[in-house]
Image (cartoon, rainbow, N blue to C red):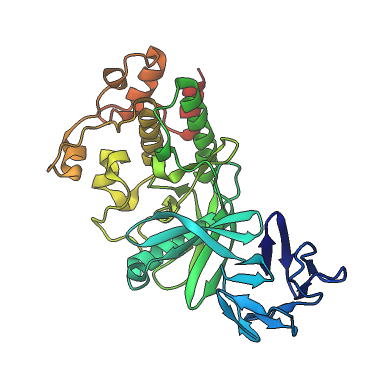
Amino acid sequence: MIRLSCGDVSQVITGSCVVGRAPECDFRIAADRKVSRRHCLVDVGPTSVTVRDLASRNGTIVNGEAHETTELCDGDELLIGDTTVLVSFFPRAVRELGRGAQGVVELVEETPGEFVAVKTLTEQGRVDPDARDAFQRELDCTKALRHNHIVDFLGSDTEDGVLRVRYEYCAGGSLADHGPIPVDEAVSLTLQALDALVYAHEADVPVRLADGSTVIGHGLVHRDLKPQNLLLTGDGRLKIADFGLAKAFDQAGLSGRTRTGAIGGSVAFMPRRQVIDYKYARPDVDLWAITACLYWMLTGQPPRDFPPRTSAVTVVLRTPPVPVRDRLATVPEALAEVIDSVLDETVHSGPTSAAALAAALRT
């Protein structure tokens, strides 16, 4: 599929298209007298797009050179008479949305005006077994989940031997692009995330075991909730993304995917117990992380200070979170009590489930 554009005229082409001045042409350029009645033929084939001049008076110019017949590429310019026609291919990459050590996400216009986010592994990630496992896990988990506040899985395919996963595009970006956020809005966004976590913590998801077989696990823990993985739609709704580190906690230790002593995720939004026992993390680590995200939305800072040239892991293991009202004195006292109770790992007085935390925030 391609789009031909000139001025305010734009037309999507899926097969053969005659370009010219005559009324019967598929793409008509009526005002330019230098355009022949039947000037050229653009043909969209299964593997290529070509343009063929139809013995026009002034020739068909592609990127400054005259051609009888030539193959077209995305972004080529056709000079037809005095009119420049832009050629756009679909699907087409628009821009990069984000990149990590192992994966890259691009904004892709699949059809004119329809956008999706496409995630692939980087070249480094393709040769890293752990990265490939995480990518497959994310695909399996997101495919199994259907919730209003979890990014929609739209499909996957392989192009040139590279697996690509398509997700809905969240035009509002991530929470990392916003903030600090007013109290009411921050709590509302957190409640949306908790609604998704109530669902995920009870969901049935496929688990690939070390022997290659697959079983159904009950209850998914995300293990990497942070502002960068909390996305906003164009109308401001929150969606949880990036389940690359998620796992069914009732199958913890059985998949063989997580080495004992391994740590994954963003340490700044991770509780001490997840650092100590990442492999067997349970849903309570998600409660801590989403509360840390709420803390960040309100204050613009994570719950702990991370001084330069200091090990982040050491800070998490040895340093308690800063009370939220010490960061921002205007946080309502009742809300601060809920936040601080969840983040305090020396006691177990706070909410113990996503539903209970949501109830506490509502009151």
Please provide percent x and percent y for residue 246.
Answer: 42, 52
Please provide percent x and percent y for residue 18.
Answer: 78, 75
Height in image: 300 above or below 104?
A: above
Please provide percent x and percent y for residue 239.
Answer: 53, 42
Which image quarter: residue 60?
A: bottom right
Residue 131 visible at all:
yes
Q: Return the residue nearer the eye: 5 or 14.
A: 5
Q: Return the residue nearer the eye: 118 or 288.
A: 118
Q: Give the left or right position of residue 132, taking residue 68 as reference.
A: left
* Residue that appears at 50% across and 25% down: 185
Please provide percent x and percent y for residue 259.
Answer: 28, 61
Q: Give the left or right position of residue 21, taking residue 163 as reference.
A: right
Height in image: 229 above or below 20?
A: above
Residue 225 visible at all:
no
Q: Return the residue nearer the eye: 42 or 29.
A: 29
Q: Return the residue nearer the eye: 184 or 5.
A: 5
